[in-house]
Amino acid sequence: MVTVSGHGPWPGGDADVLTAQLTVLDDLAALPTGVDAVGFLTRLTDRGPGADAVGRTGALLAGTPVELGPHGWKLADRPGADERRAAALLREDVEALAVAAAGYAGPLATEVLGPWTLAAELWSARGDRVLADVGARRDLGQALAAGLTDHLTTLRSQVPGADPVVQLAEPLLGQVHAGVLPSFSGYSRIRGVPGPDVVEGLEPVVAAAHAAGARVVVHLGATWVGIPAVALAGADAIGLDLADLGPRGWDERAWERVARASERGMGLWAGLPAPEVSQCSGPQLGELVRLVAEPWRRIGLPAGGLAAVTVLSAPRRELAGVDAHRAELANLGRVAEALAERAEG
């Protein structure tokens, strides 16, 4: 069956953690019959430093302290208040999940930054991006792999019935590969990372998640050039923001790579934009259905394969308020229902 899930960012402050998690799980449980759901750990974004994606992932790194610096999060000599705050926020979220998901059995997703985007976002203690140092980025990947293992162990202990899914967010992978990220000075660019090295950097994190019993989705945004590397690294699925692939979501080279990945048994997590809203007929969900189904048919994939697609909102897009996020989950449920009908036809 077509599945609905989400990335985790959710509006709200400290007092709303449990409410947010309950809301997400309840709304996913209320999806139309014939549509599956993957519950997800929420991350309330209005809590300041440590609630952001870099801070949260940095707090997971085993034996690698981080702290806030002038340009954002950076490696530190020793653990400090910034890291403790990020770790406390994550712990609070997991504890809220344990309450909200009491008795839950089924897939449950948690999202962290992937090793390449994290290396691009983190600064070394006294220098440039971690990405610029081959040894440092290798150590970072190993620290993320070990920290992710511990995180999954905690999730399983808090929600024993969970079938964990790790979402590795790699929106900067294309820029890492192309060598377009600016250095600390801004006067040069950090050298691009070759494809084999991209695979080598992803492999330990993917392998660690698999060893902990989790499936792995690598979200690339619109970076379709990273699809082969994700496949070679052993991920179970790829995530793409379909609207960013071209007009009506069509880019022949991108979809050829999706097709090859699908033939290897990889799933597709399709990031969809917010629908256009008509004053007469409400959200124009048909366009979102076409954004998935038309390229799928055009590239020659079997219609039945649509049943294995997971739909979710395109990441890194803020909505105004909880009601908008809840409406989005409901809309995605209707889109999934329509895709399921096409898969059966």
Image (cartoon, helix red, strand yellow):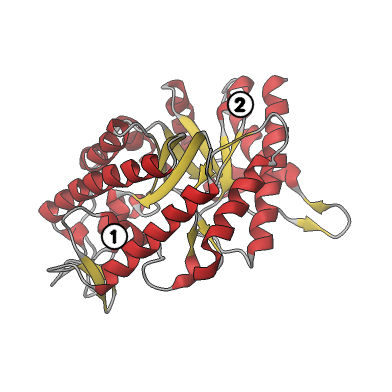
The residue identified by callout 1 is 59
Q: Secondary structure at mark 2?
A: helix
Q: Judge by depth and name the residue closer to the eye, 200 or 310.
A: 310
How many residues crowd mark 2 within 10 Å: few (<14), some (14–19), many (20+)? many
Q: Secondary structure at mark 1?
A: helix
At horizontal 49% and vertical 69% (from top left) the residue drawn is 14
Whether residue 193 is situated above or below residue 217 in the rendered picture: below
Judge from the rendering whether residue 132 lies leftward or rightward of residue 235; answer left or right: left
Amino acid identity at mark 2: Ala
The quarter of the image holding the N terminus is: top right
Residue 36: quarter of image: top right
Amino acid identity at mark 1: Ala
Q: Give the x, y percent position of residue 284.
A: 77, 49
Mark toward the start of the polypeptide (1 vs 2)? 1
The quarter of the image holding the C terminus is: top right
At horizontal 22% and vertical 43% (from top left) the residue drawn is 201
Q: Residue furthest bottom?
A: 70
Q: Judge by depth and name the residue closer to the eye, 68 or 81.
A: 81
Q: Give the x, y percent position of residue 121.
A: 30, 62
The answer to whether residue 21 is visible is yes
Judge from the rendering whether residue 141 lies leftward or rightward of residue 29; answer left or right: left
Q: Which mark is residue 71?
A: none
The residue identified by callout 2 is 307
